[in-house]
Image (cartoon, helix red, strand yellow):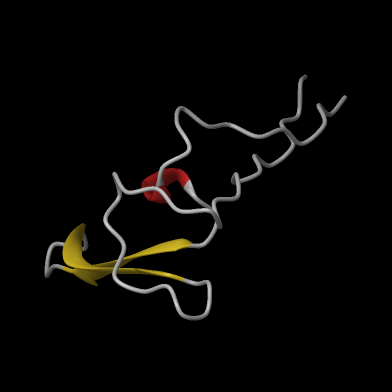
Amino acid sequence: MHTSKKYVVEQELCGTCLHYHQHYVMLREGKFLPLWYRHCGVPGVKNREPNETCPHWAGKQEEPVSLG
């Protein structure tokens, strides 16, 4: 049995947007560390902070979960 895809969002902020891209660097230990560099994938909108808002916000979709 599978559930349908749904939007999972706390607030409509850039940090929860489908278009928001956070960049990371991998440390020697294999852990990822977020960089201060991040951007929006919408053309003409760049360098967004996670707590900002814009009219291009779109929710991320959750993958279907198998209920066993």
- Residue 56 vertical position relative to residue 11 in the rendered view, above or below: below
Query: Which residue in the rendered view is the most extreme toward the left?
Result: 28
Query: In this image, 61 relative to 56: left or right?
Result: right
In the image, what residue occupies the spot 45% across and 44% down? 16
Q: Nearer the viewer, residue 39 or 67?
A: 39
Query: In this image, 26 relative to 17: left or right?
Result: left
In the image, what residue occupies the spot 29% across and 70% down? 47
- Residue 14 vertical position relative to residue 19 in the rendered view, above or below: above
Q: Quadrant of the N terminus?
A: top right
Q: Nearer the viewer, residue 54 or 27?
A: 54
Q: Quadrant of the C terminus?
A: top right
In the image, what residue occupies the spot 53% across and 72% down? 42
In the image, what residue occupies the spot 40% across and 48% down? 53
- Give coordinates of residue 57: x percent, y percent: 54, 51
Query: Which residue in the rendered view is the most extreme toward the front?
Result: 55
Query: Which residue in the rendered view is the most extreme toward the top?
Result: 68
- Give coordinates of residue 21: x percent, y percent: 40, 65
- Give coordinates of residue 39: x percent, y percent: 35, 70
Q: Examine the image and state in which quarter residue 51 appears.
A: top left
Q: Examine the image and state in which quarter residue 11 appears.
A: top left
